[in-house]
Image: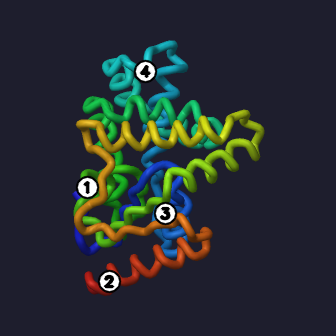
Amino acid sequence: MTTSRALIIAVDGPAASGKGTIAARLARTYGLPHLDTGLLYRAVGLGVLDAGGDLDDAAAAEAVARSLDVSLLSDETRLTTGEAGEAASRIAGYPGVRAALLKLQQDFAGQAGGAVLDGRDIGTVIAPDAVAKLFVTATPETRATRRWKQLTARGDAIAYEDMLADIVRRDERDAGRGAAPMVQAEDAVLLDTTDLDIEAAFDAARRIVEAARANHGL
């Protein structure tokens, strides 16, 4: 289990809010290991598809999660595709999948000295005793624009309208699932990046972490 003395930073929020970039920079700034927990679910979703399985088959998804090879997380090109994101959102609500990945995430958070994790339920489920908790968000339109630019820049063919519809659909699915829904922890600080570039967003995030460290005497 984690301890309050370690610098554990929980960064939650919806897709394309900027939480992953912010979390990675916070990890570099504080010299901490970083885990993008969304990649775990993306890897599981792709694992189901690669095995010829059905994303609606909870048992198949749980089986993949229990035997997940974390080396698959190195294939960032495929893990950041729209296909992977949709697959992750569909299987992330299965209690068996979440249970299979829970200990892996908690062990990562419990490393000596702390860690930075980003996802949907870090501050509420994975590391509820984290020193610093951020909930990073932006309007659906802003997030859809960001993701659309990212995907089209690398050659993916997708219309902005379809990207926006996908963002809205995933938000509803993530927030409405019964198992560990995406929700802002009561003690998390809201960071809206709608009108912020990455430098301003990171500066705001760093100040939130510094305030949390001061409150905990770290």
Q: In the image, what residue occupies the spot 55% across and 52% down? A: 141
> Secondary structure beneath disc 3?
helix
Which picture quadrant has residue 112? bottom left
Q: Is residue 167 left or right of residue 151?
A: left
The residue that mark 1 highlights is: 124
Nearer to us of marks 3 and 4 is 4
Q: Nearer the viewer, residue 81 or 218?
A: 81
Nearer to us of marks 3 and 2 is 3
From this viewpoint, is residue 71 visible?
Answer: no
> Secondary structure beneath disc 2?
loop
The residue that mark 4 highlights is: 55
Q: In the image, what residue occupies the spot 25% across and 68% down? A: 187
Q: Give percent across and percent down for residue 25.
A: 55, 68
| Vertical position of residue 25 compared to residue 54: above or below | below
The residue that mark 3 highlights is: 23
Choose the circle earlier in sequence order: 2 or 1.
1
